[in-house]
Amino acid sequence: MSESRGAKPGPEPADRVAIGITFGNSNSSIAFTVDDKADVIANEDGDRQIPTVLSYVDGDEYYGAQAKAFLVRNASNSIAYFREFLGKDFKSIDPTYCHAAAHPQDNAGNVFFSVKDKDAEGEASSVSVSEAATRYLRRLVTSASDYLGKKVTSAVITVPTNFSDKQREALIKAANDADIEVLQLISDPVAAMLAYDARPETVVEDKIVVVADLGGTRSDVAVVASRGGMYTILATAHDYEFAGVQLDQVLMDHFAKEFIKKHTTDPRSNAKSLAKLRQESEATKKALSLGTNAQFSVESLAEGFDFSSTINRLRYEMIGRKVFEGFNRLVEGVVKKAELDVLDIDEVIMCGGTSHTPRIANNLRNIFPESTKILAPATSVSAINPSEAQARGAALQASLIQEYEANDIEQSTHPAVTTVKHISNAIGVVTINTDGEEVFTPIMQAETAVPARRTVHIAAPKDGGDVLIKVVEGGTHIKVTKPEPKAKEPVNGDKDSDADSDFDSEEEEEEEKREKVWKLGKQLAEAAIRGVKKGGKVEVTINVLADLGVTVTAREVGGKGGVRGNLAA
Ligand code: ATP
């Protein structure tokens, strides 16, 4: 897949200075790895989340937070929310979020913006989306170069999982035009997983992870199987209805109503007032992620009236309930789409700016079982800053691959994070426990990328003897146990009966118990190991080849010989 790499010959590996970049519709970040530790770099304004906005004033180009501030009084010469349009033709874009900035226009199907970028009085120029991306990426990389004191030459850039080949090509071209060699494009959820898996305290183990990337204009959720260091994406969802801007809107409507009550004029009906209302609502929203109360204060919000108010988190969570519920449905929907249950999920990695919101993390905490880690600031002390995880992941990947020749990168890094062949059912052994019941022990989890090899040791019966090993496929299903109905005390009209019935109704609300149990599937092999020593162990190795053929080997640990069999794919 050559489109995922820089088309232009890049620098020699030894001359590369490589960073990680996340390029979002709302914000972007740059990160660099030193001694295996990736850090997000602050730009010259001190921002680590750099608004993806360009603004032109009197021929000067502003970007980031300064450009975002210009959306209030220089909207028509500001370009915002454009990443999404790369590689798309005019007919297929949704310009909704650009209504408060320069509007996208159609030039024979190509998207461009008309802005006065040379001087305020002169003619407006046509800036294509590709050119806007190039100008913005150049600013990002210049900031990184200034910070590092050396010229950045190359980057790993993260992209959504549904970025088309055309969009990838367009992004690579835009980066190349800004003189950046694109080492690799990696998918957003995998970047977040890399950041977590690279931490020294992480034990890399087989797990199923939900990555909830909740941004400003879109939410992207993926279910990813991590097996032996390989990532397989099992299901994804992309949503534009439940993201950060909808939470801004909740607060905008709230404060607009308060303002109307006081001054009988709607600040949403004038573009400048609306822009001020939007910026302050977003700031209030962020403050509510940290504290339980927040201020809202704007000078001359509309018709010259200043306005200030406060809101507490509880009220915010109440007025935003519908949006918060939307996030729950989105995450639950993707787990279902992967044909999994919440009980199958080991971790939920929350990333993207909106993942700072405590209500969203707490709701997911309630949806998933205790055993699932919810990695967000509100629910885990060890969570990585959700706004930084992906840039850090990209920087780690950049530092890993920068020393390779461009061709080697292309060949060796692709399958690891895209579609690799994997087994769909778990493979394990069935043994008989001391109660004479069949017990399934998984050796290789479902969704393990192949080729793969796993070994387990199985204890022989206490007194030794023959051990029968059955290798079978295993699926899981969810066993639901309803709570035992409580025998009710007869109500005989005594004074305590009210208290009793209250107690009963609480008991009745006790939730049913849901647990994951194995269901045995196709038997793959059977082997008998004769005369195992007292206290001995049998070693079973399962080897699944790239063509999904299976080899099973069973032998007594420390013993001679063994049984080996090949099975067809
Ligand atoms: P997209 O591409 O979806 O527009 P992005 O990836 O460019 O988004 P992010 O920085 O991940 O952008 O997310 C931006 C959103 O996160 C904005 O709506 C912003 O208000 C919100 N956000 C940032 N910090 C916080 C916070 N502390 N609490 C709540 N929301 C926050």
Image: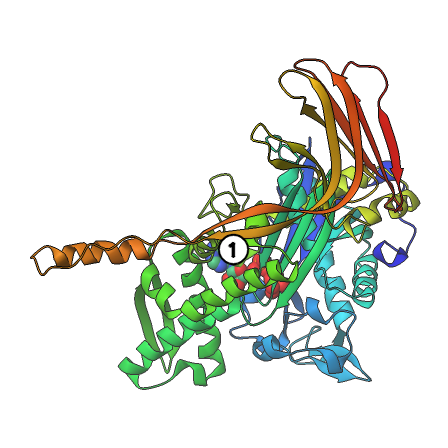
The amino acid type of the residue labelled 1 equals Ser
The front one of 402 and 193 is 193
Which residue position is annotated with label 1?
355
Kindly indicate the quadrant of the structure image that contains residue 201.
top right
**Residue name at image x 78 percent, y 62 percent:** 171
Tell me where residue 187 appears, x and y as whole percent: 72, 54
Q: How many marks?
A: 1
Relative height, residue 156 to residue 323 (above, below): above
**Residue name at image x 89 percent, y 37 percent:** 566
The front one of 429 and 44 is 429
- Residue 434, can we see it? yes
Q: What residue occupies the far left of the structure in this picture?
A: 495
Q: In the shown orientation, is residue 543 left or right of residue 81?
A: right
Relative height, residue 13 to residue 120 (above, below): above
Tell me where residue 530 appears, x and y as whole percent: 78, 20
Q: Is mark 1 within 8 Å of ligand 1?
A: yes
- Residue 312, can we see it? no
Q: In the shown orientation, is residue 216 left or right of residue 396?
A: left
